[in-house]
Amino acid sequence: MRTDPKTVKKHFKQSMATYSKNAVVQKFTAEKMIEKLEDMYFPSVLELGAGTGILTEILAQKCTFDEFWANDLVEKSKNYINKFVPDVKFFAGDFRKLNFNKKFDMIISNAVFQWCEDLEKVFDICKSILNKNGILAFSTFSPENFKEIKSLTGVALKYYTLEEIRNLLDNNFEIIMAEEFEQKLKFDNPLKILKHMKDTGVNSVTNGNWGIKDVKNFCENYRLKYPELTLTYAPIIVLAKLK
Ligand SMILES: C[S@@+](CC[C@H](N)C(=O)[O-])C[C@H]1O[C@@H](n2cnc3c(N)ncnc32)[C@H](O)[C@@H]1O
């Protein structure tokens, strides 16, 4: 599935009020990533796709920095990030198109890069705006992510495997840590799965144009194929250092 930044922006903007409460796996990946960075000091940090600040809040508690820059497609994200880092400097827009005019000591991003089909370009951008020995820390998701949705609808983001990510990073970064795992969320009924995806801004994946019949078919097929009513998340977490 191709991701159009306008649609991604629209869905995340609509989900902001419900996102932090429902994004339990994204909170877990943020905590896990920060465990590896705890007590570290970075003169300057840039967070890409900061959203409602799930990662920012933990980062601001556990790491120290002099300057914090944040970015998101959605301008309103700045209001959320401000609560955790009052003097944040904010870049609104698609980070792949922005001119940062500055280099950073750490670039960090939680659950954002799966929205970028062009991961090689993303890593090139990170390389170009990191200081030497700068850290790139991110979480994303592997092709096993939402495998139930893919098998029932045929729709999925262009997820990269950990092996592909390693290969893309290999030339310019030394990988300090890379891991992948699965987490299954359990629901009472398939409608709640659709609601969970909407509440976390992921409805671009199932395409908002479904009619009642499509929803009914989806629910029936989910119950038949996945009677335990679980939804699989497959996170990848990587910490790398610019060579
Ligand atoms: C799943 S949310 C994660 C939010 C936050 N990082 C967290 O820890 O919960 C993905 C966020 O990435 C943003 N995003 C997606 N693609 C982006 C892009 N190309 N440039 C900037 N932000 C982007 C979305 O607007 C959304 O807020």
Image: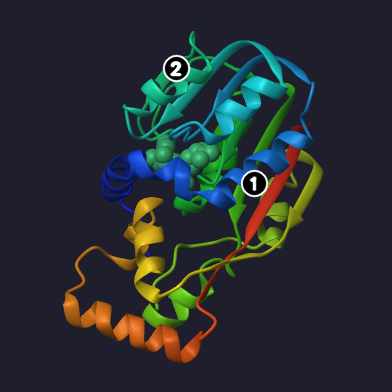
Residue at figure coordinates x 34%, y 56% from the top left: 198
Q: Nearer the viewer, residue 6 or 213?
A: 213
**Which image quarter: residue 184?**
bottom right
Horizontally, is 61 left or right of 175 in the view? left
Q: Please tell me whether residue 195 is drawn above or below residue 225 in the rendered image.
A: above
Which quarter of the rendering shows the N terminus?
Answer: bottom left
Q: Between marks 1 and 2, how big is the CA–CA gap?
A: 22 Å
Q: Nearer the viewer, residue 101 or 89?
A: 89
Q: Residue tagged by mark 2?
A: 82
Q: Residue tagged by mark 1?
A: 29
Q: Please tell me whether residue 36 is drawn above or below residue 214 in the rendered image.
A: above
Q: Secondary structure at mark 1?
A: helix
Task: Identify the disc placed on residue 199.
Answer: none
Residue at figure coordinates x 34%, y 39% from the top left: 17
Residue at figure coordinates x 54%, y 34% from the top left: 125
Horizontally, is 47 left or right of 105 in the view? left
Find residue 27 and report its horizontal and vertical position in percent.
59, 44
**Which image quarter: residue 218?**
bottom left
Horizontally, is 238 left or right of 222 in the view? right
Q: Nearer the viewer, residue 219 or 87?
A: 219
Q: Is mark 2 within 8 Å of ligand 1?
A: no
